[in-house]
Amino acid sequence: MTTEKHRRRIKVVDGRFQYRAIAVYLTVILCGLVVTAVIVAAIYLARRAAGGSPRPEALLEVLQPLLINDLVIMVIMIVVGIFTTHRVAGPVYHIESEIERVLAGEKGVRVHLRSHDSFPELAQKVNQLIERIDDSRKG
């Protein structure tokens, strides 16, 4: 159970990493939109070339819901992206800050991650390394 003291309120810890990951998510969605629009337009043009006379409004009737759908998905992906990347960026930021404390000469530093954070094995290895550094400073 996470105590209020250890709960992070800031979700954008490493903006460069997190925003880049979200940009990738959004690019994939936009590519999907473009591919879908090209397919719909190709079908429209093929029917028109075959002698059919589809109404121009028919193209808009199909594309408008697709655009709205993609906009909703993009907003959802931004929110989900921030929370999922926070699970990676948060622990990395915390481990980096603890390493900085060790490099500054502080002893007894330990990395403590929340139970649902990523990289618990890395935190354990960093703690082992810190213990060895502390032991070597004693000798």
Image (cartoon, helix red, strand yellow):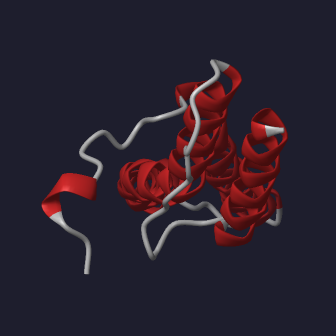
Height in image: 9 above or below 15? below
Residue 20: in sight, yes or no? yes
Looking at this rendering, what residue extends furthest in the top direction?
104
> In the visual, does 91 lie left or right of 39?
left
* Whole-percent x, y for residue 31 in the image: 72, 48
Q: Nearer the viewer, residue 13 or 74?
A: 13
Looking at this rendering, what residue extends furthest in the bottom direction?
1
Residue 44: in sight, yes or no? no
- Work out which quarter of the rendered image holds the C terminus and state it: top right
Residue at 37% x, 49% y is 75
Residue at 56% x, 53% y is 111
Q: Nearer the viewer, residue 129 or 19?
A: 129
Q: Nearer the viewer, residue 85 or 81?
A: 85
Q: Quadrant of residue 98?
A: top right
What is the count of numbered marks?
Answer: 0
Q: Quadrant of residue 10?
A: top left
Residue at 55% x, 44% y is 109
* Whole-percent x, y for residue 83 in the image: 42, 56
- Work out which quarter of the rendered image holds the N terminus and state it: bottom left
Q: Nearer the viewer, residue 70 or 27?
A: 27
> In the visual, does 2 lie left or right of 122?
left
> In the visual, does 96 lie left or right of 133?
left
Height in image: 70 above or below 20? below
Residue at 47% x, 55% y is 77
* Whole-percent x, y for residue 123 in the image: 67, 60
Looking at this rendering, what residue extends furthest in the left direction?
4
* Whole-percent x, y for residue 118 in the image: 60, 66
